């Protein structure tokens, strides 16, 4: 995952990123976040908006699990 993120950040214009949270639903230690990521590709200037969902779990006062669901093919 770390290498994927390093590769991704090398190819997008980080200053143009927009992460939009549209809805948060929670139940006990679990939360689901729905939203989208806006990105601009460094080499072409093209942009894309990718819908995303995250499942988060909190234990004590820490985030102990995060699953990110995104359309990674769209980033290609």
Image: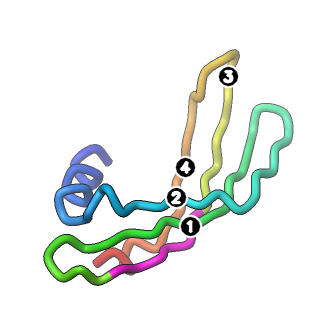
Check disc 1: other Cα within 10 Å, few if <14, some if 14-19, many if 20+: some
Q: Is residue 62 above or below residue 54?
A: above
Mark closer to the chain start, 3 or 2 = 2
Q: Can you name the residue that lies furthest to the left here? A: 43
Spatial CA span between label 4 and label 3: 15 Å
- Please state which of the two labelled residues, at mark 1 or mark 4, is closer to the viewer: 1
User: 56 or 44: nearer the eye?
Assistant: 44
Closer to the camera: disc 3 or disc 2?
Answer: 2
Residue position for label 4: 67
Element type at marker 2?
strand
On screen, residue 14 above or below 29: below
Residue 56 position in % (x across, y down)? 64, 42
For the residue pair 14 and 8, the one nearer the viewer reads as 14
User: Label 3 vs label 1: CA separation?
Assistant: 26 Å
Which of marks 4 and 2 precedes in the sequence? 2
Q: Which residues are magenta?
A: 47-52
Label placed on residue 59: 3
Q: Is 57 placed left or right of 16 in the picture?
A: right
Residue 73 position, x and y percent, is 36, 78
Q: Are marks 3 and 1 in contact (CB under 8 Å)?
A: no
- Marks 1,2: beta carbons within 8 A: yes
How crowded pointer 4 is (Cα within 10 Å; few <14, some 14-19, many 20+) is rated as: few
Residue 69 in the image: above or below residue 33: below
- Work out how far the residue at label 3 is from the one at label 2, CA to CA, in angstroms: 25 Å
Q: Secondary structure at mark 1?
A: strand
Q: Earlier in the sequence, mark 1 or mark 2?
A: 2
**Disc ID at residue 19:** 2
Identify the residue position indicated by label 1 in the image: 36
């Amino acid at each position: 995952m770390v290498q994927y993120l390093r590769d991704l950040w090398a190819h997008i214009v980080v200053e143009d990123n927009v992460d939009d949270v549209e809805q948060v639903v929670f139940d006990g230690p679990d939360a689901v976040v729905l939203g989208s990521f806006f990105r601009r590709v460094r080499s072409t200037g093209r942009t894309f908006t990718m819908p995303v969902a995250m499942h988060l779990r909190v234990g004590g006062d820490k985030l102990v699990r995060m699953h990110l669901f995104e359309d990674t093919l769209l980033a290609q």
